[in-house]
Amino acid sequence: MDVKLRILRFNPETDRKGHWEEYNIEADPDERILDLLHKVKWFDDGSLAFRRSCAHGVCGSDAMVVNGENMLACQVLVKEVSNPIKIEPIRGLPVIKDLVVDMETFFESYKKVMPYLVNDEVPGERERLQSPEDRDKFEDTTKCILCAACTTSCPVFWTADTYVGPAAIVNAHRFVFDSRDNASKQRLEILKDVNGAFRCRTAFNCTTACPRGIQVTKAIEDVKRETLTIN
Amino acid sequence: MAYQEIVSTGSVYKGRTSMWLYLFHRITGVALFGYLLLHIISTALILAGPEIYEGAEAIYKNFYFRLGEVGLMAAVLAHAINGLRIITVDLWKKGSDYQKSLNVVALLIFIGIFVPTTYRMITSYFDICIEKSSPGTTVVDCMVRPLPDWKS
Ligand code: HEM
Ligand code: SF4
Ligand code: FES
């Protein structure tokens, strides 16, 4: 089938503003959006810049706005979206070139919530034990691949990158509700801040955007209520 | 080499209902705040004397302002009910599981209060208008012009 691909291009050396460029491509309905981008880059215009690595929805490199919604280009098939296909960089982060954005603030926020296990006690003979029920409390938030689809779908984040954003809160949730972790209080102190969990205005865009199907807003709400338990 | 914060050129993010409710809540919130300021200024005119206060009040006594009041009531009501919905999503453990149903519930509560209240506001306007105006005044008269002989 013939596909019309419209890409929001930006060249930092010559442009002051993004502009749309159109490409007509022959594609199979079962091909992925990422395959279309490859066709443009490999056979039409080598200057097109975008990130991808695994091409299988694992690395989280290729989140972009496809027809107005955040998704991973490697996870969505041509037949699943309407034609023409409009592609833009994810929002709220500075664009470096075309679909490549500067993820610095995103990862700064991620680091801020201490996304690692904190426990100085000796684990004992073997591993730290945990009941299946306790493990279930944070099962959903272990699935995050840090693609930033959630954070850059958030209307609060678009206008205020000081907000830590959904992804950081998801990764805080991962450890806050882990019975083996000892730093929940510190994380909750950080997330109690005006730029923390309560900056969320429950627009639910993040939940729709997450390519891993994580109930992102639910995790944020869990964290909001948990911040109320510390003083 | 310049970074560009926003390259997006006039395309709207395709959020679902809750994204629009977020925008709606902010717009009604800011609008109500603006109204409140004007309202305080208007009522504060009483400090300048009853004649000046009455003079300002007289401007409001016509059907167009009554329609505006219906809009104001709708904005307060919608903001308040949506606010309670947001509080429910925030504080109820299962709130985010049922967020779509909560949107519908909020809409139904809004309609349930908005319709009878609007009816009362409109009919009472005509009742008062006809009662206080010179004999022979019709509903249409009440609608098309402020009534000079309508004293509070
Ligand atoms: C009548 C009862 C009211 C209730 C139950 C209510 C409830 C709320 C709630 C829960 C929020 C937080 C929204 C969120 O977290 O996303 C909020 C925000 C707000 N409200 Fe109200 N409100 C009421 C009346 C008013 C009035 C009279 C004004 C104007 C003077 C107002 C102005 C605002 C503003 C400006 C915001 C900020 C919106 C935002 O952050 O997006 N509210 N309201
Ligand atoms: S929560 Fe989902 S959308 Fe957000 S960064 Fe993780 S995988 Fe991506
Ligand atoms: S390229 Fe790795 S997630 Fe899409």
Image (spheres, rainbow, N blue to C red):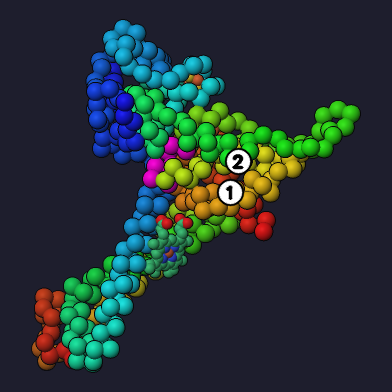
Chain bearing tag 2 is A
Residue type of the residue flagged with mark 1: Leu
Residue name at image x 16 percent, y 89 percent: B150
Q: Is residue A225 above or below residue A86?
A: below
Residue name at image x 63 percent, y 41 percent: A173
Counting from the top left corner in percent of width and height, residue B134 is at 11, 92
Counting from the top left corner in percent of width and height, residue B81 is at 44, 63
Question: In the displayed structure, does residue A121 sit left or right of residue A2?
Answer: right
Task: Give the residue pinned by disc 2.
Answer: A113
Give the secondary structure at mark 1.
Answer: helix
Point out the residue furthest to the right here.
A125
Point out the residue furthest to the top here.
A43
Question: In the displayed structure, does residue B51 sit left or right of residue B17?
Answer: left
Counting from the top left corner in percent of width and height, residue A119 is at 76, 38
Q: Which mark is residue A191?
A: 1
Residue name at image x 36 percent, y 39 percent: B14
User: CB under 8 Å between callouts 2 and 1?
Assistant: yes
Q: Is residue A147 visible?
A: yes
Counting from the top left corner in percent of width and height, residue B76 is at 37, 67
Q: Earlier in the sequence, mark 2 or mark 1?
A: 2
Chain bearing tag 1 is A
The kind of secondary structure the magenta stretch mainly shows is helix
Q: Quadrant of residue A74?
A: top left
Q: Is residue B96 visible?
A: no
Which residues make up the magenta segment? A151-159
Q: How far apart are the two marked residues, 2 and 1, measured between alpha carbons?
A: 8 Å
